[in-house]
Image (cartoon, rainbow, N blue to C red):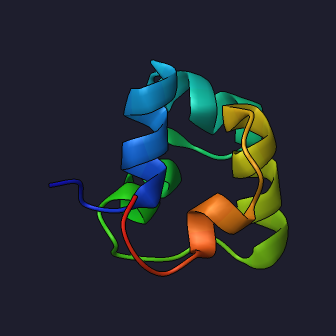
């Protein structure tokens, strides 16, 4: 089971958190806090994450199975 959808899609796409953090313009600590559900990205950040992952933003926020 994945901690959250960012973690899930990062693994599916084979992307490292450090690379995604850089593409999103945030520190690895900030990105890690999103993955570990300590904080949540705002809508603009979620859009940037989705773009970096090559997915539609809805895949990060939709309810249900991954």
Q: Is residue 52 above or below residue 6?
A: above
Tell me which corner region of the image, top left, top right, bottom left or bottom right, holds residue 36.
Answer: bottom left
Residue at 34% x, 72% y is 37
Rendered location of residue 22, percent (x, y):
67, 30
- Residue placed farthest to the left in the image? 1
Rendered location of residue 8, percent (x, y):
38, 46
Q: Is residue 60 above or below residue 54?
A: below
Count of numbered labels shown in the rendering: 0
Q: Is residue 10 above or below residue 4?
A: above
Q: Quadrant of the N terminus?
A: bottom left
Q: Choose between 21 and 4: the one closer to the eye.
A: 4
Q: Quadrant of the C terminus?
A: bottom left
Rendered location of residue 3, percent (x, y):
24, 60
Residue at 60% x, 74% y is 61
Q: In this image, 45 relative to 26: left or right?
A: right
Q: Is residue 24 above or below residue 59?
A: above
Residue at 77% x, 52% y is 56
Q: In this image, 57 relative to 13: left or right?
A: right
- Residue placed farthest to the front in the image? 65
Residue at 45% x, 18% y is 14
Q: Choose between 65 and 45: the one closer to the eye.
A: 65
């Amino acid at each position: 089971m994945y901690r959250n959808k960012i973690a899930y899609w990062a693994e599916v796409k084979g992307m490292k958190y450090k690379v995604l953090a850089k593409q999103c313009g945030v520190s690895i600590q900030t990105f890690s806090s999103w993955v570990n559900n300590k904080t949540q990205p705002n809508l603009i950040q979620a859009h940037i994450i989705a773009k970096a992952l090559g997915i539609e933003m809805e895949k990060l926020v939709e309810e249900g199975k991954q």
